[in-house]
Image (cartoon, helix red, strand yellow):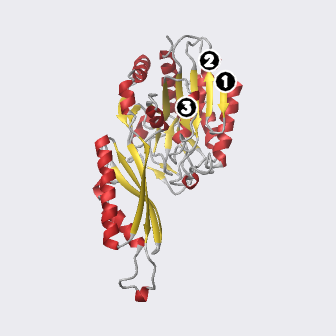
């Protein structure tokens, strides 16, 4: 689309920043990596150059507010600047496949297979963007950041478009779950704040998991292995038993749709002490409660069986934002009206994960998650269509117009 002619260059500029977050520093350093702060400062300076009111304080969150030229409630949009650490995320070298031919995309040691990515067929003849195969691409969520900034730039250069005050927010460390821990909620004036952190084109996510993280520490007793009978208490074995006791049919690799899961992670230690984390996810309040109870029962059974002491701290991370969407239907109604005007077909679904919007929903601010067009997030085979990004920008612009009275 000519109206968003700067989108590709903007996206490529943002993904050149090394912003992979570091979960080990969550709660210790904000943001957890220097590259995030560099990108946040760039976004703030770009907002200032547009003439937007800006804020960038000790919370390390960027806010930009473009004053409206028409009455209406303030509408907000949000993206996060960090990328995940599941695979290497720094040193991104993007490849733009113009006039994509519909076949497999060969990268360095990685193949994006058309058979495994049926949506690629939708973009034959279009521009598809990948990394070089040695890192992720960073569309999660620099595509969202680029779309938001491109739309804001378009509004500035087209003052004839009627819109209310528009707020944009950029957060760090979403991937660590700590991005909203110090969010300046008191500065937000938006009646709704849409996150642009979705994937497949056409999907709008209205709900998400209830999420918790259980930190588990097993205290054992070390002893010489040759004389250990009745004396040694193996913390590593007990930690492994906890993992093996989790139902395999309720794991991320076995569940989809509306089914939740348990996921062990971050296992380390030895005989004297071992630790692990278990992530708990469920869409329903009742299922969420039962999963916590199940994990508690497993831990106490292992504690008795292995004669060890186990400390467990279960902390809620975020909650299903669906309730807030249901209580504030105007946010989704604006999306529906905008899509009808554009002739876009949308599907409304739940995200099998969470967004910063879930934390906003806890405060009563509806935050539906709009698509960016990305696929295979958190992997070396990540890809996104430029045309899908442009249509996401068009949808965002149309939603802004819907908020003008």
The reply to whether discs 3 and 2 touch (Cβ–Cβ < 8 Å) is no
First in residue order: circle 2 vs circle 1: 1
Q: In the rendered image, is residue 9 in sight?
A: yes
In the picture provided, is 203 more to the left or to the right than 382?
left
Instruction: Answer few, some or many: residues within 10 Å of disc 1's Cα (few below 14, many 20 plus, some between 14 and 19).
Output: some
Q: Quadrant of the N terminus?
A: top right
Residue that badge 2 annotates: 67
Q: In the rendering, at what x and y percent does residue 236 appear?
A: 42, 71
Asked if disc 1 and disc 3 are in contact, CB closer than 8 Å, the reply is no
Hey, which quadrant is residue 130 in on the image? top right
- Name the disc covering residue 185, or none: 3
Work out whether residue 215 or residue 126 is closer to the camera in this orientation and state it: 215
Q: Residues within 10 Å of mark 2 (few under 14, many from 20)?
A: some
Asked whether disc 2 touches disc 1, contact meaning CB atoms under 8 Å apart, the reply is: yes
Precedes in sequence: disc 3 or disc 2: 2
Residue nearer the viewer, 264 or 372: 264
Q: Secondary structure at mark 1?
A: strand
Q: Position of residue 170 (x, y in %)?
A: 58, 35
Please tell me whether mark 3 sits on a helix, a strand or a loop. helix
């Amino acid at each position: 689309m000519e109206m968003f002619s700067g989108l590709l260059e903007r996206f490529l500029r943002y993904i050149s920043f090394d912003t992979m977050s570091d979960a080990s520093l969550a709660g210790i350093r904000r943001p957890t990596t220097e590259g995030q702060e560099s990108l946040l400062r760039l976004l703030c300076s770009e907002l200032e150059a547009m003439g937007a009111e800006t804020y960038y304080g000790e919370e390390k969150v960027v806010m930009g507010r473009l004053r409206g030229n028409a009455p209406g409630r303030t509408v907000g949009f949000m993206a996060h600047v960090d990328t995940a650490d599941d695979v290497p995320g720094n040193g991104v070298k993007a490849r733009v496949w113009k006039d994509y031919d519909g076949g497999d995309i060969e990268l360095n040691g990685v193949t994006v297979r058309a058979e495994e990515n049926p949506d690629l067929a939708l973009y034959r003849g279009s521009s598809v963007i990948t990394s070089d195969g040695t890192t992720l691409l960073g569309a999660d969520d620099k595509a969202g950041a680029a779309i938001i900034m491109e739309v804001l730039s378009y509004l500035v250069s087209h003052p004839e478009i009627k819109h209310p005050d528009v707020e944009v927010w950029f957060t760090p460390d979403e991937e660590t779950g700590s991005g909203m821990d110090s969010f300046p909620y008191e500065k937000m004036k938006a009646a709704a704040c849409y996150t642009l952190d979705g994937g497949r084109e056409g999907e709008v996510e209205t709900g998400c998991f209830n999420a918790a993280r259980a930190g588990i520490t097993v205290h054992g007793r070390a002893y010489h292995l040759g004389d250990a009978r009745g004396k040694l208490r193996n913390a590593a074995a007990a930690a492994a038993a906890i993992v093996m006791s989790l139902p395999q049919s309720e794991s991320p690799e076995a569940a989809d749709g509306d089914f939740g899961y348990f996921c062990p992670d971050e296992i380390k230690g030895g005989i004297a002490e071992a630790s692990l984390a278990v992530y708990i996810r469920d869409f329903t309040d009742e299922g969420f409660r039962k999963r916590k109870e199940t994990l508690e029962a497993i831990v106490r059974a292992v504690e008795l069986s292995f004669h060890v002491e186990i400390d467990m701290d279960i902390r809620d991370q975020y909650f299903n934002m669906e309730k807030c969407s249901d209580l504030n239907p105007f946010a989704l109604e604006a999306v529906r009206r905008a899509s009808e005007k554009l002739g876009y077909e949308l599907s409304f679904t739940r995200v099998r994960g969470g967004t910063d919007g879930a934390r906003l929903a806890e405060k009563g601010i509806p935050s539906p998650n709009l698509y960016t067009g990305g696929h295979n997030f958190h992997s070396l085979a990540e890809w996104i269509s430029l045309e899908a990004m442009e249509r996401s920008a068009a949808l965002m612009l149309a939603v802004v117009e819907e908020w003008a009275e």
